[in-house]
Image (tube, rainbow, N blue to C red):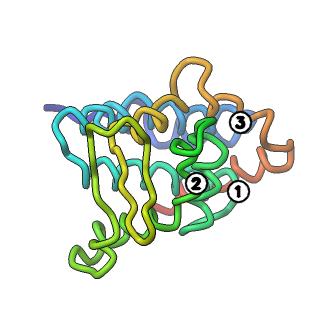
Amino acid sequence: MLNTTHNIESFENRLARFQNNSPIESIETLLNSIDNYFNNEIGAAPERYQTSLLFMGIHAVTLTISEVFWGLSGESGYKKFIETFVDGKTDDTRFSTVSNKIHNWRNVLAHQWLASSGYEIQYDYKMESGFVKDEDLLIVNPKIYCEYYLAAFSAGGKIWNYEKILTGAELESAKQRIISKFVRH
């Protein structure tokens, strides 16, 4: 399998395109790239019960975009993204209300694996709710969580309305953060 996610155009051409155009150019390149490549893998995770990969993948995207849009990282960046683009209209699909638990769990998955907080989260692919919180236990339906995340990127999804959410100055700051990250790494 050939991975051509980033080498469709030369580094120099992409950098020039980012520098010489409006913020929309770099922002939509980022969003389209995530949607066309990374989200395909995230979307396949629930049917294969690849739950840890699902949580880590969604988290990687949320923090990437939160850092670009708002300069936020960690738990605050994760919550801001979920609140802005993923949350549903019902209590059981407002994932931002339990974002601290999901963020902490992703950190355990990515950096620690064994932790006492592992006793505070469970998955249930068959429940009809997005999540249920019962005292210290959070039960998440990963399939529903993933559906709401992917809906943000669908045609007409909330993420594509970023120009209504960000001011002109914030759009320019987002462009500069994209360029800085692109050049630095």
Distance Cα–Cα, label 1 vs label 2: 17 Å
Distance Cα–Cα, label 3 vs label 2: 18 Å
Q: Quadrant of residue 180?
A: bottom right
Disc sitting over residue 96 in the figure: 2
Q: Secondary structure at mark 2?
A: helix
Q: Is residue 109 visible?
A: yes
Apparent side of residue 20 relative to residue 86 in the rendered image (left or right): right
The residue closer to the viewer here, 25 or 160, is: 160
Above or below — where is 40 with respect to 114?
Answer: above
Residues packed near mark 1 inside 10 Å, few (<14), some (14 to 19) or many (20 plus): some
Apparent side of residue 43 relative to residue 182 in the rendered image (left or right): left
- For the residues labelled 3 and 2, say whether their Cβ atoms are less than 8 Å apart: no
Instruction: Count how many numbered circles sit on residues in the image.
Output: 3
Residue at the spot x=36%, y=55% of the render?
Answer: 139
Q: Secondary structure at mark 1?
A: helix
Disc sitting over residue 70 in the figure: 1
Tell me the residue that label 3 is attached to: 162
Apparent side of residue 75 relative to residue 114 in the rendered image (left or right): right
Circle nearer the viewer, 1 or 2:
2
Residue at the spot x=44%, y=31% of the render?
Answer: 35
Residue type at mark 1 is: Trp
Q: Secondary structure at mark 3?
A: helix
The residue closer to the viewer here, 19 or 149, is: 149
Q: Earlier in the sequence, mark 3 or mark 2?
A: 2
Q: Earlier in the sequence, mark 1 or mark 2?
A: 1
- For the residues labelled 3 and 1, say whether their Cβ atoms are less than 8 Å apart: no
Q: Is residue 179 visible?
A: no
Residue at the spot x=65%, y=55% of the render?
Answer: 80
Give coordinates of residue 45: x percent, y percent: 24, 39
Residue type at mark 2 is: Ser
